[in-house]
Amino acid sequence: MQIIDGKQVAEQIKQEIAAEVQQIIARGGKRPHLAGVLVGHDGGSESYMSSKVKACEQCGFKSSLLRYEEDVTEQQLLDTITKLNRDDDVDGFIVQLPLPRHINEQRIIEAIDYRKDVDGFHPINVGRLSIGLPCFRSATPAGIIMLLERYGIDTRGKHCVVIGRSNIVGKPVASLLMQKSNPGNCTVTVCHSATPNIAEHTRQADILIAALGKPGFVTADMVRDGAVVIDVGTTRVPDATRKSGWRLCGDVDYEHVAPRCSYITPVPGGVGPMTIVSLMHNTLLAATHQIYQ
Ligand code: GUN
């Protein structure tokens, strides 16, 4: 069994990006600039956002954080998005989700110029991804693909089972892995909350991707010997032994599942750091106009 060290791969890719940024600056080019919009003070969103700002520093990007209180109106956010869309210095930007309930998330996502949508959430990027055209790929699925690539895991002709059908992870990762590409060329099954007997499906998986957000959901009896297991779960569970009072828990019962696997991602230190690095990669692609003019 080999542990997929997402933290290490992420550090390596950040160094590669930083080297590319140095070259851009040396040629007299502009420093890539990522902006983030953060609403409220949710602990998870705060920590994601501060990790993104830190990653920008490591990559040599400029970053701006625009903060709003929980009571911000949808119109105020839409006005901010219009400004960011028009700001030539901003190469890409994200609006951290989830948003308060009085704000229509889809309306916010669709207001973002798809050419600056480095989260890959705009329907134009989602649509282009699904038909295999160049686009900004949703960060977590893109990070998973990078891990499979860097570990030389052969996906061609393999049966991949995804648990979860979110717009951010389940659907796009299923789409990428069924694509006629490498990594890709998988036969993909997507299980979700309305699937009876999920274990019957997961036991057939050569590659199992757990992205449902239920701590410890995947148990050893659900996994075939030699499977590749990718754990996307990042639920905060109470832990009195930690200073913070919580720890991150994946969707996989790691202790019992790991011995059966050929490869497995740990939580933390697996998919999480790769998600942030994918966002950095998308920002570099935006700044260098490699996808859209
Ligand atoms: N909330 C959880 N994951 C993400 C993400 O990748 N991007 C944004 N904007 N919000 C999120």
Image: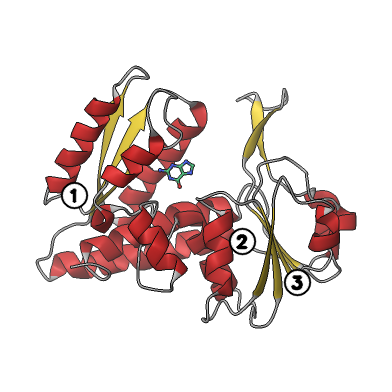
How much space separates mark 1 and mark 2, taking CA atoms? Answer: 32 Å
Q: Earlier in the sequence, mark 1 or mark 2?
A: 2
Residue 5's disc is 2
Q: Earlier in the sequence, mark 2 or mark 3?
A: 2
Q: Which residue is under mark 3?
A: 206
The residue nearer to you, when weighing 46 against 196, is 196
Q: Ligand 1 within 8 A of label 1's CB?
A: no
Where is residue 230 shown, x and y percent of the image? 67, 59
Quadrant where the image shows the C terminus: bottom left
- Ligand 1 location (quadrant): top left
Q: Which residue is under mark 1?
A: 90
Q: Is residue 255 left or right of residue 191?
A: right
The residue sitting at the top extreme is 71
Residue sitting at x 50%, y 27%:
43
Say which element carries label 3: loop
Residue sitting at x 81%, y 51%:
196
Q: Amino acid at mark 3?
A: Asp
The mark lying in front, picked from 3 and 1, is 3
The residue sitting at the right extreme is 221
Where is residue 23 shown, x and y percent of the image? 21, 70
Residue sitting at x 48%, y 63%:
142
- The crowding category of the residue bearing disc 3, from other C-alpha atoms within 10 Å (few below 14, some 14 to 19, many at least 20), is many
How much space separates mark 3 and mark 1, taking CA atoms? Answer: 41 Å
